[in-house]
Amino acid sequence: MLRKSSAKGTAELRRQNRDAILQALWSNGPLSRTDLSDITGLSPASITNIVDQLLGEHLLLESGEVKSHVGRKPILLDLNRQNIMSIAIDVTAPNEATVALINLHYEPLRTVEIEIEEYQISSLLEKIMVAVHGFMRDAHKHCVVGVGITVPEDLDISKAKMLFSTSLSSERIEFAEALRYQYRIPVRMERKVNGMALAELDTGVCKELNSFLYLNLAKTVDASLVLQRKVVLQGFTGDIGHIEVASQGVACRCGRRGCLDTLVGGWAIMHRVLADKLLELADKADPLLLLSTHVSVDDVVQQARCGDELAQHICEDAVSALRKALDAVLALLQVEGVVLGSDAYRLWPRALSELLQGKSLRKPVEVLSGGLASSALLGAAGFAFRTWIGEK
Ligand SMILES: [Zn+2]
């Protein structure tokens, strides 16, 4: 018994030491073995031992040499970014998902778009599993270190079960559990907006920022908070869309009035445009004309630029609502910037960030627009990598 627990303790210690080396290279690589020893506090012998193992697993590369005043030229070590992969899954709707194999340069090597006809989450998960299986089968040359999944705020798939078959039996189990069982790798599931923020941090406009507030301006507005280069996962709900910004405002889906969502969220804006069209068409004979009216928030941005009055009002109302909400939230936070992004619209976050730069916020923070395509997918990969290096 004693032996068993001490073996477990040794394995745990070894894993911690390995994580410490991976984390040092993640944040500060490339590094020499001496640098690694200085940063992690591990003995040179331990470093050599673990590094040799990581080199053997093709997770590290020896790269270049640095000149040293004592004449020796230590070889630098770095993560093998080309070879280290994660499987990223971005669930976009109960019947839609994107699955990709992404390396540590954040380059998607293969991508599969999945769309099914039925709104049946278990069927979607089974299709995703097939795609993951295909990637794992073909990725044998590389090291797949984990799976990351991002899900929309209004869709909880953590308890969703799927049919999982082994050679012995067939049963319904949770998706993440099925992945862990099948591939013996860590699986991490996070909210979509957190994935989007993480992608901007690791590979987008926030590479130089340590702390920022990220807003996903989609059908509704959600926020993610990054402090000291980590996404805050506990104690921050991101529910910025229901901050009151207009006391006598429009009714919100939460039952109250004047929420940020009613002035910046895509649903509310489409509603406002259609209501205006309805008035316009009231005199005309054919109400079916309304049904053929397709409005996107990006169209509103373009119409505003062309001088359309309603569109300009919508943009002005949105930006002053956003300023109010941000002034309230930023009063409680110490961040360097605010990033506006969107997984639904291309022009909307850019237009609002430009307008917001002109209207000074109470706190002088940088306002940026996040322009990464597929940022939730890249963020899913980012979470998988961070779980792999043992980052909490
Ligand atoms: Zn609300």
Image: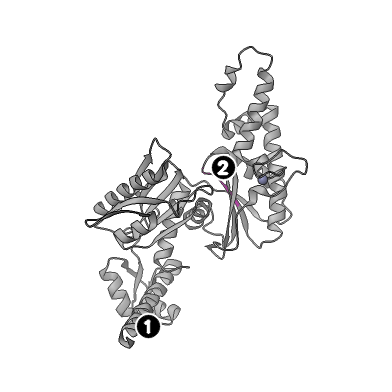
Indicate which disc, 2 or 1, sits on the residue closer to the N terminus: 1
Quarter of the rendered structure image containing ligand 1: top right
Task: Give the residues in magenta.
Answer: 339-343
Nearest-to-viewer mark from 2 and 1: 2
Which picture quadrant has residue 53? bottom left
Q: How far apart are labels 2 and 1 at the CA level?
A: 57 Å
- In terms of depth relative to the viewer, which is nearer, 26 or 161? 161
Q: Residue at x 39, y 68 (%)?
A: 30
For the residue carrying disc 2, how many other residues have a C-alpha within 10 Å: few (<14), some (14-19), or many (20+)?
many
Label 2 sits on a secondary structure element that is loop
Q: Quadrant of the N terminus?
A: bottom left
Q: In the rendered structure, find residue 70 and report the number of the disc placed on it.
A: 1
Q: Nearer the viewer, residue 165 or 71?
A: 165
Locate residue 391, reporting x and y percent.
46, 68
Residue 351 in percent (x, y) is at: 61, 40
Q: Is residue 24 left or right of residue 184?
A: right
Which structural element holds mark 1? loop
Q: How is the image coloured?
A: one colour
Whether residue 312 is visible to the viewer of this picture, yes or no, is yes
Q: Quadrant of residue 184?
A: bottom left
Residue type of the residue flagged with mark 1: Val
Residue 192 at x, y = what percent? 50, 51
Displayed quadrant of residue 35: bottom left
Main secondary-structure element of the magenta-colored stretch: strand
Label 2 sits on what residue type?
Answer: Ala
**Farthest residue toward the top?**
285
Q: Which residue is mark 2?
A: 218
Above or below for 19 versus 98: below
Task: Judge whether 72 appears above or below 321 on screen.
Answer: below
